[in-house]
Amino acid sequence: MRTVDVIIVGASLAAAAAAKRTVDAGLETVILERKELPRHKICSGILSPRGHRFLLENFGPLPSEALHEPTACRGVTFHFPSMVSLPMDFFGGTTPHLHRKYSDYWAIQQSGAEVHDQTSFAGLEDKGDHVLVHARKHGEPVEYRARQVIGADGPSSLVVRAVYPDYPKQIPWFFVGQKFHDIIECPLSPDYFHFWFHPGLGHYTWSHARDGRQIVGVGFKRGDNFAKKHANVVNYLGEKHGVRLHPHTDDEGCAENFGPSLINRYVFGRDNVLITGQAAGFLNMIGEGMSCALHSGAICGEAIVEARLRNRPMQDMYRRMIGSEVRRTSDQWNPLKIAFDRPHEADFPAALMALGWRDRAKVLRDMWRFVVLYKEFKWGRQIARAALQRPFLGGYPMQRWL
């Protein structure tokens, strides 16, 4: 049995950020990854300016192999059923288009942690003063003993399921899939990430250029037909935007949970087990989760270090410290913040106000019809309650967190 200070499950960007903090503090840290590294990661790869700043400040300049073509993204463009489009440049300038297979591996290496790949997490037992972690490497059982465990293994986190077995049943799940097409003709600017607020296309619809091809992505309730949803989007892009594509050559998809950031229902762990990144529920608007994964991961690592130095309860320390990232992430979904503040890294209010009043009214109407798509999940009252509590509490209530 290997004994270490910290075990991190999942070789993600959140794991790299957490490991950087614990390793720098002198804590022996091991990262477990079920796949062989470098491993494929399903992701658009469009990083926010804030995430880019974190990588530069903590890990240094990105190597060329960690980027897709085009290597940079200028901003986002919102498209609406009324055929109004709003291109918005990022405040911080262009950002890198990450090739997650190599960018994650690079960040993990830069963290200084010891990595055990092809090692699958199988369960844990919190013994009070330590945690036993059960895993399998090449099919053979292995065990670790650690003072703390961090779950950084994504939205379908096995660590979350080990700590809160019923949690996945309490939240709605979506399938997010993307197909890759060779381009015949595509008027959509390759400098932008394109997102559609269109209830007829799905809960989350996007497209952008990558390595000479066009990604067409769609998110929908788990159980719906991916092929039909995707074909509907491709037909729409052809009819409304003049996008002509060859049949798709590759596709990929995964389960996602969009709910926690909208309704302040994050899960941060229990006792000596901490949850971070998208496993905890962090996801920015338009589905960019890398920046909040990096920052929440760093806070998770810092909480372990600080709790040890101050001899304070680990969970209390983590929950006080993570409040800043909860505010930043949930503010992006907060209708009052969107209307009267600038919670995003592109200026939606300015782009909206630059429209004529007729187009402005069309956009607001289209956005409302898109929001109604989520009515069946009964999030409306929870979102409104959190939005109203935000100015009075200075944040979002911790009582909602697990």
Image: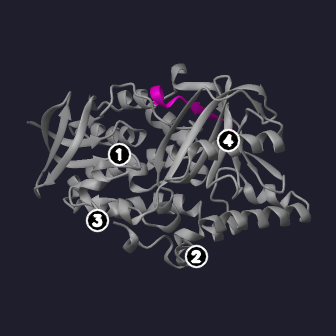
How is the model colour-coded? Answer: one colour
The residue at which mark 1 appears reads as: 152
Q: Earlier in the sequence, mark 1 or mark 2?
A: 1
Q: Is residue 30 visible?
A: no
C-alpha span from label 1 to label 3 = 19 Å
The residue at which mark 4 appears reads as: 231
Q: Secondary structure at mark 1?
A: loop
Q: Is residue 202 above or below residue 364?
A: above
C-alpha span from label 4 to label 2 = 34 Å
Classify mark 3: residues with Cα within 10 Å, few (<14), some (14-19) or many (20+): few
Amino acid, disc 3: Asp
What span is colored magenta in the figure? 93-103
* Residue 30 screen position, x and y as percent: 24, 35
Amino acid, disc 2: Ala
Q: Residue 384 bears which disc, if any? A: 2
What's the residue at 52%, 27% (across, down)?
61
